[in-house]
């Protein structure tokens, strides 16, 4: 079998498995729930990786994009096509993605004007302003939240969206454009000299990341069926950052591994009660101190030494 | 009415400014955004609560004790979580800082429980009326001690040898050690002072808004961070100015608008200021060198 069929073949097999799991209820709903959370976290973390890993910027605003996507998708499912059932669910998800992408674009234009920590500060403001906006806008239930969202999210949707995200991120990074992204990270001045339009590269990468975060938010909203502005606080962003750097940024496998390990770890440690939330950050600190590049990350210093 | 709001602004601003100083000093010396700082502030408030309620300390003894204890906590955090990463990519230390913050929150949550705790009134409140406005002794105490601490810190950094070493280190990381400056010692002192000031802010928060909970540090911490950024990260005068500005904006916005708009206005202001002064008020413009 030619190797170019292996990837799509695996994808179709996975899709068949998840579809039959959904249709025949093959696995216990609790496990299915955890798998879906992992899938959504993979979407969020992989898209964040494009900005924080490959582009080398530091965004803390992923929860805001997730919120925009969640609210937009929920709004489409509830108000635009209320009686269509799950048939038009992908359209809701796309709507969430596009809404979030537009916000990402609006943020990216001023954010990439200047210095290092600028993006972190602007995305921090974005998260606070988004939360405050959803609290004050009358159409989305205000602080009480948006409830009655139909449960359209199932394993196959999550699987398909997660694979799509990872594949798109991988292809973007390996394209000529993606080399531009990495060049900007490694040396912005040198990238400019070889005619990379650094500002454009940053904005496009940021918008792609925001789009997928919006899709992830849409899936999340249709999974937990109830969202409120507090769901998407800065702590949510922190979670994605931790998963990303745990797995290893600027790698394809890192965010997937990080999302899976962090989600499963918090479930496995459930017997510890509240103490599981104490154990998890300690584990992360220990890992960071001994392996700052994350589990999958390669040691940039070592590789540079090898070259010399 | 206006003078009354001004007093409230000064009180809130003092708290933001004290925390912002810790952010700005650590950023100046290590170029690290210490995201755990807001939670150090929270631990400070709980430490004061413990000393007051369980051991019955009066305010005059409890304040210096809390300062020293939380200052030592700051040193320990730096030694365990940040120092091993000094040579690694900058972002690794930021991630451990986030994890340390999360650890402090969840540890406090596990130890004392999620329900808010009442902070005891350590001094009996007296209300002084001066003409048409009133000032409580708590308010006056908070503002006066905060300003005294800020002036003390400014003098310390400007006049002492240690302060000079701190400035040298934030000016140039490569050459300062060559001049015989003990980097570890200076970093420890920086963390000690920053954490101690945050602990003072914790006590003042307990006195002024007498309910504390394990998550109180998140929002206050981020706002103090915004104060530091508005003032220009790395600048002590900037952090103080930013803190008072933020306090004023917050008090004024809640005076005229529903309180749910508070955060939107504060962070909107941040964006506007950064648009016109990307380095903050007292920050030095960064130059990109080839």
Image (cartoon, rainbow, N blue to C red):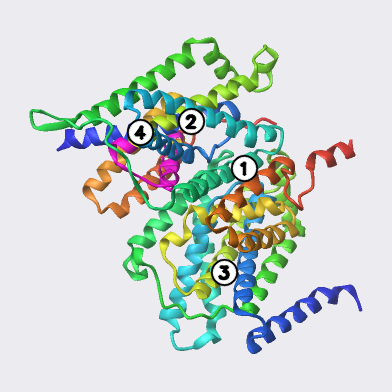
What is the span of residues highlighted in magenta in the rendered image? B206-228
**Quadrant in the picture for the N terminus of chain A:** bottom right
- Local packing at callout 1 (Cα closer than 10 Å; few below 14, some 14-19, many 20+) is many
Q: Is residue B8 above or below residue B152?
A: below
Residue at the spot of label 3:
A215
Parent chain of label 1: B
**Residue B152 position within the rendered picture, expressed as x and y whole percent measured from the top left:** 40, 17
Q: Is residue B224 magenta?
A: yes
Q: Nearer the viewer, residue B282 or A269?
A: A269
**Which numbered tag is attached to residue B96?**
1
Secondary structure under badge 1? helix
Q: Which residue is at 67% across, 75% downward?
A: A160
Which residue bears the numbered disc 4? Answer: B52
Tell me the number on the disc at residue A250: none
Distance between the alpha carbons at the discs numbered 4 and 1: 32 Å
Q: Is residue B90 magenta?
A: no
Which chain letter goes with mark 3? A
Residue A139 picture location, percent across and down: 34, 70
Q: Is residue A11 visible?
A: yes
The kind of secondary structure the magenta stretch mainly shows is helix
**Residue sitting at 28 percent across and 52 percent down?**
B259
- The residue furthest right is A1
Q: Quadrant of residue B185?
A: top right
Q: Are marks 2 and 4 in contact (CB under 8 Å)?
A: no
Numbered disc in front, either 1 or 2: 2
What chain is tagged by disc 2?
B
């Amino acid at each position: 079998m030619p190797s170019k069929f292996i990837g799509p073949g695996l994808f179709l097999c996975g899709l068949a498995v998840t579809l039959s799991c959904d249709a025949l209820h093959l696995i216990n709903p609790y496990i299915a729930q955890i798998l879906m959370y992992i899938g959504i976290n993979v979407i969020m973390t992989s898209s964040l990786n494009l900005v924080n890993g490959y582009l080398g910027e530091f965004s803390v605003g992923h929860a805001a994009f997730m919120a925009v996507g969640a609210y937009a998708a929920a709004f489409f499912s509830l108000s635009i096509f209320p009686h269509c059932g799950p048939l038009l669910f992908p359209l809701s998800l796309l709507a969430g993605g596009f809404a979030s992408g537009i916000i990402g674009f609006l943020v990216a234009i001023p954010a990439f004007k200047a210095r290092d920590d600028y993006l972190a500060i602007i995305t921090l403001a974005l998260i606070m302003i988004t939360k405050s906006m959803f609290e004050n806008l009358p159409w989305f239930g205000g602080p009480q939240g948006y409830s009655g969202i139909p449960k359209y999210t199932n394993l196959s949707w999550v699987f398909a969206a997660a694979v799509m995200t990872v594949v798109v991120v991988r292809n973007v990074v390996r394209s000529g454009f993606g080399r531009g992204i990495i060049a900007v990270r490694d040396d912005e001045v040198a990238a400019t000299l070889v005619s990379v339009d650094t500002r454009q590269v940053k904005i496009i990468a940021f918008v792609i990341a925001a789009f997928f975060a919006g899709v992830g938010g849409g899936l999340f909203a249709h999974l937990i069926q109830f969202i409120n502005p507090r769901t998407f606080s800065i702590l949510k962003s922190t979670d994605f950052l931790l998963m990303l750097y745990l797995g290893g940024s600027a790698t394809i496998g890192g965010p997937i591994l990080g999302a899976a390990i962090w989600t499963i770890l918090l479930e496995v440690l459930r017997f510890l009660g509240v103490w599981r939330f104490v154990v998890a950050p300690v584990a992360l600190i220990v890992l960071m101190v001994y392996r700052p590049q994350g589990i999958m990350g390669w040691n940039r210093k070592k590789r540079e030494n090898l070259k010399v | 009415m206006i003078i009354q709001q001004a007093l409230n602004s000064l009180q809130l601003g003092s708290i933001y400014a004290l925390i912002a100083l810790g952010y700005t000093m650590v950023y100046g010396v290590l170029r690290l955004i210490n995201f755990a700082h807001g939670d150090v502030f929270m631990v400070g408030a709980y430490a004061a609560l413990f000393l007051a309620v369980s051991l019955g300390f009066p305010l005059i003894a409890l304040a210096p004790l809390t300062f020293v204890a939380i200052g030592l906590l700051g040193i320990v955090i730096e030694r365990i979580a940040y120092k091993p990463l000094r040579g690694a990519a900058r972002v690794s230390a930021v991630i451990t800082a986030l994890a340390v913050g999360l650890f402090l929150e969840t540890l406090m949550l596990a130890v004392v429980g999620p329900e808010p705790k009442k902070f005891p009134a350590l001094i009996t409140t007296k209300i002084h009326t001066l003409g048409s406005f009133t000032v409580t002794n708590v308010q006056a105490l908070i503002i006066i001690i905060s300003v005294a601490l800020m002036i003390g810190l400014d003098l310390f950094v400007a006049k002492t040898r240690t302060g000079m070493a701190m400035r040298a280190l934030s000016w140039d990381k490569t050459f300062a050690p060559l001049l015989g400056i003990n980097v570890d010692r200076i970093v420890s002192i920086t963390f000690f002072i920053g954490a101690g000031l945050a602990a003072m802010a914790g006590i003042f928060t307990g006195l002024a808004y007498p309910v504390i909970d394990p998550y109180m540090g998140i929002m206050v911490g981020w706002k103090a961070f915004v104060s530091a950024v508005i003032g220009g990260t790395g600048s002590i005068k900037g952090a103080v100015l930013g803190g008072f500005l933020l306090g004023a904006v917050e008090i004024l916005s809640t005076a005229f608008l529903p309180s749910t708009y508070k955060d939107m206005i504060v962070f909107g202001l941040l964006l506007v200021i950064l648009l016109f002064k990307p380095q903050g008020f007292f920050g030095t413009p960064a130059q990109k060198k080839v």
